[in-house]
Image (cartoon, grey):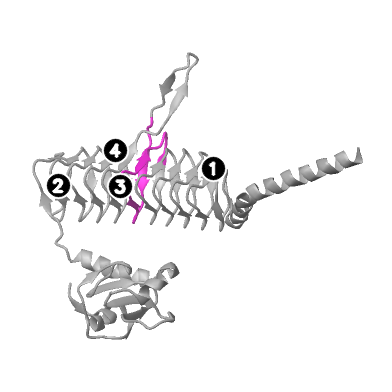
Amino acid sequence: MRISVEQLASIVKGTVEGDAKAYIENYSKIEEATNGCLTFLANPKYTHYIYSTKATAVLVRKDFQPEQKLTTTLIRVDDPYETLAMLLNMISSQEPAKKGIEQPCHISDDVKVTEDIYVGAFAYIGKNVRLGKNVKIYPQVFVGDNVTIGDDVILYPGVKVYHGCKIGNRCIVQAGAVIGADGFGFAPKEDGTYEKISQIGIVILEDDVEIGANTTIDRATMGSTIVKKGAKLDNLIQIAHNVEIGENTVMAAQVGVAGSAKIGKNNMVGGQVGFAGHITIGDNNGFGAQSGIPNSVGSNLKLIGSPAINALDFARNQVYLKRIPQISQDIKQLKQLVDEIKREKL
């Protein structure tokens, strides 16, 4: 898409400082941008790149104040990251929408399909499946019996949705994700073996949920495993049976949530965080990467570590840990000094 800086600024309601007649033909990260590219500056850690970037224009906050001379054009907006997201979504929406039913595939006779549906080759849609409008089912997707799928849902290649599960409107499930496999339920027996506990519940994804590639969400033992409205889960996440993920909670890759944990709304969870089972997490928390959460916690907290503690306390502890070798040496020297004093008294 070729567009002038002036035209682009008009679309995003930004103000231009520099060459408004220059043209944008591509998008790039600020450190990799070349002539003709639009980039953005949202994280202060990348500020130094703005003085050397080859980008034609950079989206910056309205209050950004350069400390050196710039060779690029600035487009000042309220939120550069949000503005870039809007522009990328505009570009994506201009791509031709997939429609039609490819062969070979299997769609059960009792399934009603709309004119705007897309079903890719080798997809399987089971009995009594209810499909909304504008659903996109890519190749090799499996949709089990009695599944409900809302409007504007995208199931990318290789997604598996087990029987009875419910997917709300505008959900996106990335390639290889598994929705509704059995929860990990086994009863120990006297002879040391385990008896499988049937998992008769379902998974519910509410509206505007996105599930990353190869993420697994287990069906409930009884009742429902629920991912609530607006939640976003990254790739390679494990959500166990009867878990609840609150509205607008986001989780980075490799998070694990054990059975029956209840996660509140608007939580931000870093990569590889582990939640124990049967705990309750409040709202508006931030969890640092690789944190271990063994117990219930409240709301409006910043936690990190394993077991997780207050982020400020964790930072102080890290300083102390770095000083342990020197402290150990100091203690050794003090002990030697005490021993010498004792010998002199003798």
Q: Disc 3 or disc 2, which is closer to the eye? A: 3
Mark 2 — residue?
A: 120
> How far apart are labels 4 and 2 at the CA level?
18 Å
Mark 1 — residue?
A: 279
Q: Where is residue 14 in the image (x, y as percent from the top left)?
A: 33, 81
> How far apart are labels 4 and 3 at the CA level?
16 Å
Identify residue type, mark 3.
Ala
Q: Looking at the rendered structure, which numbered label has been put on residue 162?
A: 4
Identify residue type, mark 4.
Tyr
> Around disc 3, counting alpha carbons within 10 Å, would you say few (fewer than 14), some (14 to 19), or many (20 or more)?
many
Left/right placement of residue 185 relative to residue 339 reads left
Identify residue type, mark 1.
Ile
In terms of sequence position, does the residue under pointer 2 or pointer 1 come before the other? 2
Question: SS class of the residue under badge 2?
Answer: loop
Identify residue type, mark 2.
Gly
In terms of sequence position, does the residue under pointer 1 or pointer 4 come before the other? 4
In the current view of this chain or complex, which residue is farthest to the top? 191
Would you say residue 105 sits in the magenta stretch? no
Is 19 above or below relative to 164? below
Question: SS class of the residue under badge 3?
Answer: loop
In terms of sequence position, does the residue under pointer 3 or pointer 1 come before the other? 3
Please name whichever residue, 140 or 237, is drawn nearer the observer in this view of the structure.
Answer: 237
Question: SS class of the residue under badge 1?
Answer: loop
What range of the chain is rendered magenta? Answer: 199-224
Please name whichever residue, 202 or 251, is drawn nearer the observer in this view of the structure.
Answer: 251
> How far apart are labels 2 and 1 at the CA level?
41 Å
Is 35 above or below relative to 147? below
> How far apart are labels 1 and 4 at the CA level?
26 Å
Q: Disc 3 or disc 1, which is closer to the eye? A: 3
Mark 3 — residue?
A: 213
